[in-house]
Amino acid sequence: MPPATTRFAPSPTGLLHLGHAHAALFAAEAGGRFLLRLEDIDRTRCRPEYAAAALEDLAWLGLRWEQPVRVQSEHFSEFAAVLAGLEARGLLYPCFCTRAEIAASASAPHGPEGALYPGTCRALSAAEREAKVAAGLPYALRLDMAAALRAVPQPLWFDEAGEGRLRCNPAAFGDVVLARKDTPASYHLCVCHDDALQGVTLVTRGVDLKPATQLHRLLQELCGWPAPRYRHHALLLGPDGRRLAKRDHAPTLRALRQAGRIPAEVRALAGFYPPSTAR
Ligand code: GLU
């Protein structure tokens, strides 16, 4: 098998910390070609200065990646085209419900990403939809899960390193949101689109995203994108045994650097010792 093409795909919502270093080094060491992508579609949380800092910190750590860096916010029209294609096939519908309305729906069962959408807006007639859009109500675009499942051969599988073929149950996600007014394409859609576009053959990422792979396989099949292989890694834990997170003040790469740590030490702190050879 030819060496894999891997990528590291951070969202620039803050400075990178040791958990990011672990994910980046894991991706870089797992493949032959190593790509970088900035997943900055959420314009309310991502900031250009964090994107610039991420590139600088990763280079300081000794990582080298192929150019160009894919910056998702520069490609909204590509995601919109995919959404339009799914909509034309009757696989999406507009949803006007507020978060509070969904949370209040008493018996909502839970999926991997929280309360499942009860399907209220799926039942709207074309005239009702048009009236709401004409009234200027904001809406999200949801995947009609039942229709999507009918559109692809079942069951779906994904290939997880060390575990073999794992069976997917995308129905557990319900009618997921694929676009919102403030974020016109979802993480799920963009990540699958860009992995296909960039020719990523091995997706490495934290095990917290492993459940989402079941949904990603469905989107890949719906859109005719190839299925990459997957290798989910354990999350780096802090001294308290909890996962590192920005909100808990995980040490940033920048702070470690400013405290006089050298790249080899930081790579070791991120679980990569002996230090990887620079690529
Ligand atoms: N952008 C995602 C994150 O920061 C990672 C996406 C992925 O690796 O699939 O958590």
Image: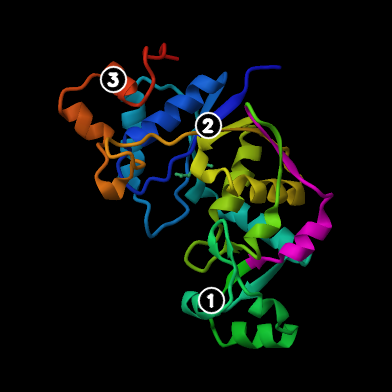
Q: Is residue 21 left or right of residue 249?
A: right
Q: Amino acid at mark 3?
A: Pro
Q: Position of residue 216 (x, y in %)?
A: 65, 47
Mark number displayed over residue 102: 1
- Quadrant for the N terminus in the image: top right
Q: Please identify the quarter of the rendering in which residue 194 is found.
A: top right
Q: Which residue matches tag 3?
A: 263
Query: Along the line of sight, which residue is nearer the eye, 168 or 18?
Result: 168
Q: Residue at x 57, y 63 (%)?
A: 179
Query: Label 2 CB, ligand 1: below 8 Å?
Result: yes
Q: Around disc 1, counting alpha carbons within 10 Å, would you say few (fewer than 14), some (14 to 19), or many (20 or more)?
A: some
Secondary element at image label 3: helix
Q: Earlier in the sequence, mark 2 or mark 3?
A: 2
Q: Nearer the viewer, mark 3 or mark 1?
A: 1
Calculate the distance from the C-alpha at mark 2 to the C-alpha at mark 3. 20 Å
Residues at marks 3 and 1 touching, judged by CB atoms closer than 8 Å: no
Q: Is residue 87 left or right of residue 111?
A: right
- Using the image, determine if residue 211 lies above or below residue 69: below
State the extent of the magenta-drawn residues as a range: 142-161
Query: Along the line of sight, which residue is nearer the eye, 109 or 142?
Result: 109
